[in-house]
Image (spheres, rainbow, N blue to C red):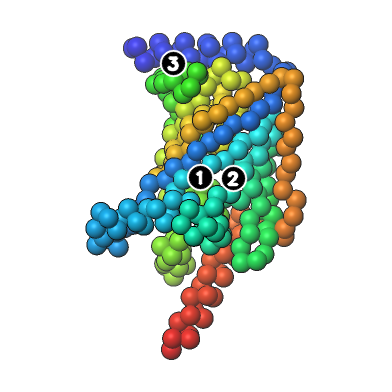
Amino acid sequence: MKSYILKIVLLIVIAFISENTCGQNFHGKAIYISKSKMELGNWGAKLTEEQKKQVANRLKNRLEKRYVLSFNNAEATFLEEEKIDAVSGATDSWGGYFSRGDHYKNIKESKIIQSQEFYGKRFLVKDKLYRIDWTIGSESKKIGEYTCYKAKAFVPYSELNWFNFSWGDLRKNTEKDADKKETTEKMIIVEAWYAPEIPVSQGPAEYWGLPGFILEVSAENTTLLCTEFSISKEKTVKIEMPKKGKEITKEEYTATVREKMVEMRNNRMGRRG
């Protein structure tokens, strides 16, 4: 009963905020820290704790990242701040092939544009913005000065990982092709914390669609947490969509990467033979 009453109160608050901010244009910036848990699988089980720490230090640039979200009511860009490897003094170019590129979304026009670079070629991925079917809960917590509420959703794996690559995914897709059977796609549990008092339905990366700004979101082994936030009705924020690269869809980009990786593997095996 208590949970039901809290949900009713929350809906009233959301309705009040929406009514009083309708037609207002907001602009802002948010800094997000991304942290991912290291998954070493069966190989990791053979390592000592000291060896695991060494691997974690080597992979720190991939496990911990910093992003800047620039937004208004309709548009947003989500850009990673490039980091220099503390050990080698170099940037992580190989890891960058399978990381999220410069991301732009327009929630009014329901579209995304993302710049991806793979093996010296630049691609401009244009596609429809996936609409997340959120379930709003009554659980709350403070993030900075804002009271945030929890929301949950199930999102197709391919919508969150189309720019990534793993040999495991490739094996699964090969098995599906061989069986010629239609299988249900893996769904990812996404948990988000949003602030209704920030009247903008935006969030980091692909996440959006809640009655308030998303300050924290977790999916699989990665959490994005907002550590700095500013918003204004007077100061505008420049938002530029990526423009360079071969135009391609998400599905086409995924297929292109997999095809190239298979080609590289086959060439390597051929040389060994």
Image point 61% across, 67% down: which residue?
Answer: 119
Image point 57% across, 40% down: which residue?
Answer: 67
Q: Nearer the viewer, residue 165 or 240?
A: 240
What quarter of the picture does the C terminus occupy?
bottom left
Where in the figure is residue 78, as x and y percent of width and height?
Answer: 62, 41
User: Of label 3 and label 2, which has the lower sequence position?
Assistant: 3
Residue named by callout 3: 7
User: Of label 3 and label 1, which has the lower sequence position?
Assistant: 3
Q: Residues within 10 Å of mark 3 (few under 14, many from 20)?
A: some
**Which amino acid is tagged 3?**
Lys
Where in the figure is residue 94, as x and y percent of width and height?
Answer: 53, 62
Is residue 121 toward the left or the right of residue 185 in the image? right
**Which amino acid is tagged 2?**
Glu
Q: Given the current orientation, which residue lies at the most extreme bottom position?
A: 273
Viewer can see residue 81: yes
Residue named by callout 1: 65
